[in-house]
Image (cartoon, grey):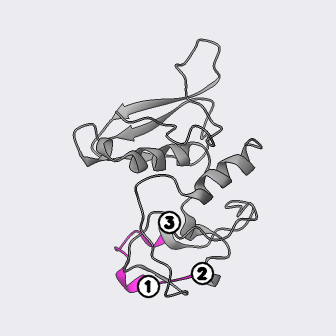
Amino acid sequence: MVSLDSNSASFCVRFRPKTNDDEYFISIKNGSQYSSYVRRVYRGGQSVTLQMKSYCVDHEATIMHEFMHALDFWHEQLRPDHDDYVTINFNNVQEGSEHNFNKYLSDVKDTLGLPYDYNSKNGLTTIITKDRNVRIGQRYTLSTNDIAEIQRYYQCS
């Protein structure tokens, strides 16, 4: 399995084995998909589900993406200011998945004063950048803004 803190010099959240005193913890589950709730849903453990026999475990960014959800981060296209940066082509959104492209209010999806992160995961034909010079869809590592969001949210550096 890949490292969960590849940017350890700047990634201020550390993962360690659970102890009996931990009230909140993340457990990794093997499943048929990869998923995680955003933020702590209930007291106790939260599962991050990964497909152990798929491309998921071979792609560090996919795993880190799911852990970002567990750390309370939403998809970038849910930002309240997304209309300033991208156009959502709802004709290309899979039926039943439209909610994944709604704007959230700032009390749910805080921009933390950072610009829109074009390097977050999304569908190339579903999300169209307003700045045609920006390429989107990078999924190799956490972006600079992903790291900045973590640092601002958890007040660390």
Of badges 3 and 2, nearer the viewer stands 3
Q: Is residue 86 magenta?
A: yes
Q: Amino acid at mark 3?
A: Asn
Q: Residues within 10 Å of mark 1 (few under 14, many from 20)?
A: few
Q: Is residue 146 magenta?
A: no
Q: Quadrant of residue 11?
A: top right
Relative horizontal placement of residue 145, taking residue 34 as reference (left or right): right
- The quarter of the image holding the C terminus is top right
Query: Spatial distance from mark 3 to mark 2, Cα to Cα?
Result: 12 Å
Q: Quadrant of residue 76?
A: bottom right
Residue bearing mark 3: 119
Residue bearing mark 1: 89
Query: Spatial distance from mark 1 to mark 3, Cα to Cα?
Result: 18 Å
Of badges 1 and 2, nearer the viewer stands 2
Residue bearing mark 2: 85
User: What residue occupies the far front of the structure in this picture?
Assistant: 9
Which is nearer the eye, 124 or 29? 124
User: What residue occupies the far left of the structure in this picture?
Assistant: 53
Helix, strand or loop for disc 3: loop
- The quarter of the image holding the N terminus is top left
Instruction: Look at 34% across and 73% down and name the residue there.
Output: 94
Instruction: Look at 50% across and 63% down and name the residue there.
Output: 120
Work out whether 67 lies above or below 99: above
Q: Residues within 10 Å of mark 2 (few under 14, many from 20)?
A: some
Helix, strand or loop for disc 1: loop
Q: Amino acid at mark 1?
A: Asn
Q: Are marks 1 and 3 in contact (CB under 8 Å)?
A: no
Work out whether 78 lies above or below 71: below
Residue 66 placed where, x, y %?
46, 47
Relative horizontal placement of residue 4, taking residue 12 as reference (left or right): left
Which range is magenta?
Answer: 85-99
Residue 25 placed where, x, y %?
57, 27
